[in-house]
Amino acid sequence: MQIFHGPIITCDKENHVFKYLVEDQGKIIYVGDDLPNEYDHHGKIIELQEKALLPSFGDGHMHFSNYALFAGTYFDVREAKNFEDIKSQITKFITKHPKKKIIIAFGASKHSVEEKRLIPRQELDSVCPKIPLVIVCYDGHSAICNSVMMNKFPEKIQKLRGFNADQGYLFNEAYYDGVDYATSLISPITLINSMIKSYDIIAKYGVGMIHATEGIGFPNDLDVTLVSLIAKAKTKRNSFQSRIFFQTMEIEKVLKRKLPRIGGCFATALDGCFGACDAALHEPYSNDLDNNGILFQSEDEVYNFAKKANRAGLQIEMHAIGDAAVTRAVNAIEQALEDFPRDDHRHTIIHACLIRPEDMEKIARLGIGITLQPGFLISPLEPIEYLEEILGSRVKSSSPLRKIKDAGIHLSGGSDAPVTHPNPIEGIYGACNHPYDPSQSLTVQEALHMYTSEVAWTTFDDHDRGSLEQGKIADLVILNKNPLKVKPANLLSLKVEQLYLSGQKYKSGMGIPSMLWNGLIGKKPKT
């Protein structure tokens, strides 16, 4: 038995803040302002003092396999100041790992380097002429390759829209298929090692549950298999929770694996992003009046997918950034629910950066959730000056957190990692300090809900997790300060001090043999 004394921020529906929480055998058995006599002197008392206890955080949308490769094996160039910095990182990696058969990095942005353009393949060739190299851009919807990699792509990829052989750039469909192909060249052992390391990295951010969107080109959807296996092992070892969204429009593949969720990005991305200027808009881009972005599937394809998935009882997620893509997603879900009504479907739109008022009303009426990434609002890799250039005045209505919340829509937070770091504190700061329109900022309490109770709600976990209430699982996090007493501008001063899952301190360092043993014999987790 453990007794926590101090600020207990429950994140329940009433926003209670209590003084005591009692945990026993992995469950919360009491929360309140006075400690009952039956618990006094019967457990270890943990005095929080100026610290605070909250539900463990959740990440409502991340590309776990992608993130794992960059964080656990390869490297990140988002801090690079110029091309020379990027090339230096590549050289250091090759020197340290000369036998790698492919190199995949992340984070290139034309906005954060002195050259104010994407590094071309010729620059990459100067330091990496023999090993296939892919640098995925910060937006997760474009990439840069060296000549070896560009020449290695099959002819069908080289003929796709967005394949720029001269510069080594991949956009549009060439990006999706190109990255799928590149990841298929990575060995399973590399992927497994990356995943194991990355769970420990994520846990340091106080995250105890992730919504992992998988299906990125590995043969036989190996990433889906491995995330399922490792999730089973992590659940047995320390109760870390993973909820898988299979990025496919092939309903049968999901049903065969007995997964309850379908969607995410890649195959279920309805449009692109602002970084590549292919997010689908009702009105053209301000700096290119001939460009309304791209809708990657036909209307019939999206509608038929939504109807079939909904009839199969699956929970649907679809990537939609531009307002035209949001309209298509909303209409597809509306038609699916008219075809086969479901009271508590919890279908979700990811991102939803621009939303027309009529679609906002439909989202609320239909009970559609939105998973948004407020950490991206504060990223220097896509500054507001760039968004103003491409969107004009529409930038002020982008990511309208306050309007979404006031409409009564379930709004959860995620990182879209590796697009942003899987650090909920950065997301909470972004949600409370909206840079495009301060009136769209949330309160600290509302932002905390985005990364706790709302993440749990999105995947039907709210009966067991997401808030500190009697009878729920004791997934807890201790912060160095009480966030409710921190000014929004100072929220980045918050630090995670300890993560508890099922009442136990998180255990890191699981190796492959342990993972395979726990994964094969462990109790099947909820996925």
Image: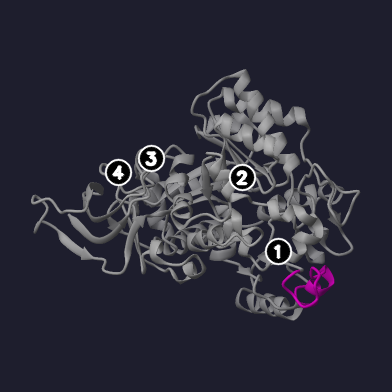
Q: Amino acid at mark 1?
A: Glu
Secondary element at image label 1:
loop
User: Disc 3 designates what residue?
Assistant: 524
Which callout, 2 or 3, points to the residue nearer the camera?
A: 2
- Between disc 4 and disc 2, whose residue precedes? 2
Q: Residue at x 64, y 27 (%)?
A: 334
- Between disc 1 and disc 4, whose residue precedes? 1
Q: For the residue carrying disc 2, how many other residues have a C-alpha within 10 Å: few (<14), some (14-19), or many (20+)?
A: many
Q: Quadrant of the N terminus?
A: bottom left
Residues at marks 1 and 3, CA–CA distance in whole angstroms: 41 Å
Residues at marks 4 and 2, CA–CA distance in whole angstroms: 27 Å
Q: Which residues are magenta?
A: 111-128
Residue 364 appears left or right of 177: left
Asked whether the residues under the numbered discs 4 and 2 touch, taking CB atoms below 8 Å apart as contact, a structural biologist would say no
Q: Residue furthest top?
A: 339
Mark number for residue 350?
2
Residues at marks 2 and 3, CA–CA distance in whole angstroms: 28 Å
Residues at marks 1 and 4, CA–CA distance in whole angstroms: 40 Å
